[in-house]
Image: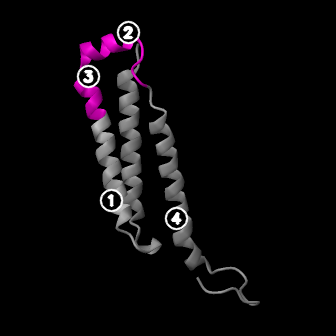
């Protein structure tokens, strides 16, 4: 980032854009993290009975899918050395996929 001058006290927009994109991605990831941490656990007999009937393996598969998608996103972002190199569309697709898995898991665990 170039130093501030009297003529240009604020950084140019082209310098700030990668930073703003990264901040948006960080907020999206933080939102997903909060949702994952708040996912319901199986704590009532009624729920456990349903899961046993429908299949505990299905529920575990949702969780493994969450882990897999999160791991790929973390690996992709861990390889980036400069903010300009972030593949923002691909990262947004990963975050969207994680949100879809969360939604499917929540629908699965709900009791009608």
Of the two numbered discs 4 and 3 on the same chain, state the one appearing first in sequence: 4
The residue where tag 3 is placed is: 56
The residue where tag 4 is placed is: 21
Query: Does residue 55 appear to the left or right of 30 in the view shown?
Result: left
Query: Does residue 48 appear to the left or right of 14 in the view shown?
Result: left
Of the two numbered discs 2 and 3 on the same chain, state the one appearing first in sequence: 2
The residue stretch that appears in magenta:
41-62
Question: Which residue corresponds to the image point at 49% horizontal and 57% vertical from the top-left?
Answer: 25
Residue 2: give x, y in percent of width and height. 61, 86
User: Which one is in front, 43 or 12?
Assistant: 43
Of the two numbered discs 1 and 3 on the same chain, state the one appearing first in sequence: 3
Q: Secondary structure at mark 3?
A: helix
The residue where tag 1 is placed is: 75
Is 46 one of the magenta-colored residues? yes
Of the two numbered discs 4 and 2 on the same chain, state the one appearing first in sequence: 4
Outermost residue on the right side: it is 6
The residue where tag 2 is placed is: 45
């Amino acid at each position: 980032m170039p130093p501030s001058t009297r003529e240009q006290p604020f950084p140019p927009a082209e310098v700030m854009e990668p930073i703003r994109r990264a901040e948006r991605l960080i907020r999206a990831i933080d939102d997903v993290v909060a949702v994952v941490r708040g996912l319901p656990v199986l704590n009532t007999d009624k729920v456990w009975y349903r899961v046993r009937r429908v299949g505990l393996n299905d529920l575990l598969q949702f969780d493994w899918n969450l882990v897999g998608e999160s791991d790929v996103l973390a690996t992709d972002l861990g390889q980036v050395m400069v903010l300009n190199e972030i593949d923002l569309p691909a990262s947004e697709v990963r975050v969207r996929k994680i949100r879809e898995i969360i939604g499917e898991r929540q629908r699965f665990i709900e009791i009608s």
